[in-house]
């Protein structure tokens, strides 16, 4: 069952708008209609949002995003086409039916959403629940729970004026959560926020969505925001949806020149993940092996490092050729770990940007793990650099990033580098 389905949606503003739809279907352009005093705000939009998905509609100002979302929530009647919400048709239905579906299924978060200044934060979050017929105690309970979920626990008794802009926007989110609907529609909900606060809100939305499994239709004019949030993205231009796909699909296979030029300066380091750039480890030995085996594998494969793996495919560490050669020469029996064997590990969904941060403070290749801690791939530094180089522009690597292929020549400056936000890095090996 689709959470939201839009089929052939048109919205034309002006006199006798259906005439405009007929002309568009006959091949007339938006500009042609403009000359007749008609605005074709949305043209033949079709898409499906799956339950639990974050679906982003992305487009420049004036491309028809707000008009589209208003047809989805029933505020605008489409000039043509149909909308279903959780398999219930909301176009061409009675006003009562429309109101019922809206109330039970959809909540909305706007860019500038008006908090009632003389009502408390809790009352603001509970706004709308009265219509649902909840009594005061239940309303308070739902509001407090929602405030907790957005990190505003304890603020329920304050007035909105005592909150920062970012916090006020979270009250809007809390209100939508308190309504308890499965579907949330968000129109430029974070666009007015400062970049850092905005980033925090994006993270929080992703986290909330994963925890509460809401279906979210999110509108933005910011491509990086779209790529960060969207499971899928619809790229809109002049009223039409040009392409629908995952961030990767849109980056790697833009459907036309418009989309291609749009994504030119997207920061790939925030879109691509460890899973996109990892490769199989070339040389692997078991943790029970000795220096002789390591040396043989390295010589035969011409590897300057190899991965040592436990029986259950969890990684034990990385060995480097000079240490192994030394161990063979001196007749050492155990594996010659060196300080270099400190092995960074990451989850598959770690962004390229975060991988740089990890790599900047480790000399070894990064080992990518599945949910059970088993090795699924490795990312040597040279691979990471190559992935960013494809970028053309926008890759923001730490300045202290050292030479990619030589682990031993630049240790100090790399070890000194500042690395914010490093995801769970597992130090050392068994
Ligand atoms: N109520 C309206 N009456 C007439 N034209 C409108 C109305 N709402 C939006 N438009 C026009 O429709 C087009 C799309 O607007 P909108 O959906 O607000 O775009 P976006 O949200 O992408 O900025 C614009 O040209 C806008 O001027
Ligand atoms: Mg808009």
Image (cartoon, rainbow, N blue to C red):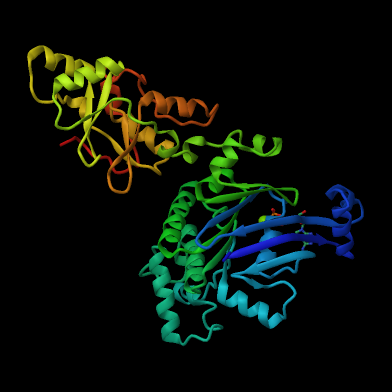
Ligand 2 falls in quadrant: bottom right
Pinpoint residue 79: horizontal percent, then vertical percent: 80, 65
Q: Is residue 324 left or right of residue 25?
A: left
Q: What residue appears at the point 17 percent right and 14 percent down from the top-left corner?
A: 325
Q: What residue appears at the point 69 percent right and 60 percent down from the top-left corner?
A: 68
The relative height of residue 183 versus residue 137 in the rendered view (above or below) is above
The relative height of residue 371 versus residue 336 in the rendered view (above or below) is below
Looking at the image, how many numbered discs can be counted on the residues?
A: 0
Front-most of residues 30 and 231: 231
Front-most of residues 59 and 286: 286
Q: In this view, does 172 lie to the left or right of 409?
A: right
Q: Can residue 97 be seen in this view?
A: yes
Q: In this view, does 214 lie to the left or right of 35?
A: left
Pinpoint residue 91: horizontal percent, then vertical percent: 72, 71
Q: Is residue 221 left or right of residue 132?
A: right
Front-most of residues 319 and 101: 319
Q: Is residue 157 visible?
A: no
Pinpoint residue 67: horizontal percent, then vertical percent: 71, 60
């Amino acid at each position: 069952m689709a959470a939201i389905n839009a089929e052939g949606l048109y919205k034309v503003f002006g006199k006798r708008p259906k005439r405009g739809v007929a002309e568009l279907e006959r091949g007339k352009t938006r500009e042609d209609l403009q000359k007749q005093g008609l605005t074709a705000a949305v043209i033949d939009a079709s898409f499906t949002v799956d339950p639990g998905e974050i679906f982003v509609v992305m487009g420049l100002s004036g491309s028809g995003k707000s008009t589209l979302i208003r047809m989805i929530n029933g505020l605008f009647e489409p000039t043509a086409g149909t909308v279903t919400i959780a398999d219930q048709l909301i176009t061409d239905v009675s006003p009562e039916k429309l109101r019922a579906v809206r109330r039970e299924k959809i909540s909305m978060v706007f860019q500038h959403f008006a908090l009632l200044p003389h009502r408390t934060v809790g009352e603001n979050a509970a706004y709308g629940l009265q219509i649902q017929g909840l009594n005061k105690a239940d309303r308070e309970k739902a509001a407090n729970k929602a405030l907790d979920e957005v990190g505003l626990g304890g603020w329920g008794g304050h007035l909105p004026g005592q909150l920062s802009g970012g916090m006020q926007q979270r009250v809007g989110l809390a209100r939508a959560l308190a309504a308890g609907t499965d579907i949330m529609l968000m129109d430029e909900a974070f666009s007015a926020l400062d970049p850092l606060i905005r980033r925090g809100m994006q993270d929080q939305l992703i986290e909330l969505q994963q925890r509460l499994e809401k279906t979210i239709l999110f509108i933005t004019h910011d491509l990086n925001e779209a790529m960060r949030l969207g499971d899928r993205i619809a790229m809109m231009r002049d009223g039409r949806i040009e392409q629908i796909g995952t961030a990767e699909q849109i980056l790697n296979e833009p459907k036309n020149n418009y989309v291609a030029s749009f994504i030119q300066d997207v920061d790939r380091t925030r879109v691509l993940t460890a899973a996109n750039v990892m490769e199989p480890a070339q040389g692997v030995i078991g943790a029970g092996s000795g220096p002789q085996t390591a040396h043989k594998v390295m010589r035969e494969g011409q590897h300057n490092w190899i991965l040592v793996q436990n029986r259950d495919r969890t990684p034990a560490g990385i060995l480097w050729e000079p240490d192994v050669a030394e161990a063979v020469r001196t007749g050492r029996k155990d594996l010659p770990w060196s300080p270099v064997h400190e092995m960074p590990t990451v989850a598959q969904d770690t962004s390229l940007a975060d991988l740089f941060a990890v790599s900047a403070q480790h000399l070894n290749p990064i080992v990518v793990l599945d949910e059970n801690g088993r090795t699924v791939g490795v990312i040597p530094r040279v691979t990471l650099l190559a992935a960013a180089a494809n970028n053309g522009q926008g890759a923001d690597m730490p300045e202290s990033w050292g030479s990619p292929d030589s682990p031993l020549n630049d240790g100090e400056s790399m070890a000194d580098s500042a690395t914010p936000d490093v995801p769970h890095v597992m130090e050392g090996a068994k």
